[in-house]
Amino acid sequence: MCGGGALHYNYCVSLNLNQRRTVYFLGAGASKSLCQQLPIGSELTLEKLCDPASYLDESDPLSKVIGDLREFAQKHPPVLRNKEGNIESAFADLEFRHSFQEGSLQKGWLVYCVVRRLQLPRDGDWCQAQIPQISKESLNKFLSFAKRENIPIITTNYDTLVERGLTWGRNSREVDYGAARLCTPHQGRDQASTRDDVRPLVLLKLHGSISWQHCPKQTCGYLVRGIYQGAAPNAMAGDDTCASCHGNLSAALIEPDYEKNYDDAAISEVLERAKQELDHAEIIVFAGYSLPDADKVIRCLLKTFT
């Protein structure tokens, strides 16, 4: 396990691995150690997500919906104690409250709050103010080391901080997400390879990403948007449509529920790739991940490592 702040990444690089097959496993704490704006599970409570002032503006298409959700939360105090302090508890609490009340609340609204909360602005001044230079240097060193040593990164994070880190250095920006259907030929300049002689970073996002979306029609497939574009929230808000069939797109991510559904084709592929990487691993280095009870599938996945 790694410590906080930039130490997460410096420690990973400083380990004497002796050529042993290694896997890095990053949780929300690893992202927050670099960017304080990114939340950890205990900061994704229903009440906090229903206060959209910090991450939504009045022009957001679902700002009224979030207002309705906030009003519901205020009228119906929590019934369940959020002992674990995570988003799964917030989901369970919402369902429990709603089961005894009238209305048409949807969990999708809460997921929308989460993905918008995790979306990073593109503005350079914001980046300079929110992410210290020492943290940027640490992440860049960590990613360079992972690419050079061919160390895969497994993560449960939706955010695109790792992909963004690739833009801060002279590394190739190409990412291997572990699923052929996510390797689209038109990923945009944010993910275009700048050095053909460098292998892509292996980044296995077990719960999907805010930059992924897909068309429900299998013939159309998946699209990885640029790292600054909110593909998942755009799909949820109905802002993006499929370029092929012009139908509505869906977010390609696993909802943060206690009973997570991994039926999404691309994410199932990513999960299988993660199993393969863990089967061959001799060392797993965890950074900012607490292995919560809600991650049952990941607990089973890690049992393959002996």
Image: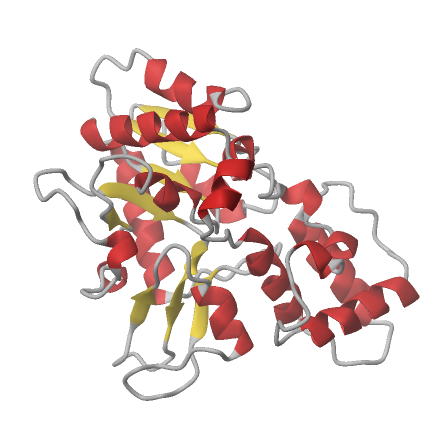
Is residue 186 placed above or below 3 in the rendered structure?
below
| Residue at point 76%, 63% (across, down) | 94
In this rendered view, identify the residue nearer to me: 92 or 135: 135
Query: Is residue 163 rendered to the left or right of residue 38?
Result: left
* Nearest the eye: 249 or 141: 141
User: Above or below — where is 244 with respect to 168?
Assistant: below
Which quadrant holds the C terminus? top left
In this orientation, does residue 10 appear? Answer: yes
Residue at 28 percent across and 15 percent down: it is 17
Residue at the image point whose x is 47% and y is 73% from the top: 235
Residue in the image at 48% along x and 78% along y: 239
Figure quadrant of residue 167 = top left
Nearer-the-camera pick, 199 or 170: 170
Identify whether 75 is placed above or below 208: below
Question: Residue 296 vs residue 101: left or right?
Answer: left
Is any part of residue 156 visible from this angle?
no
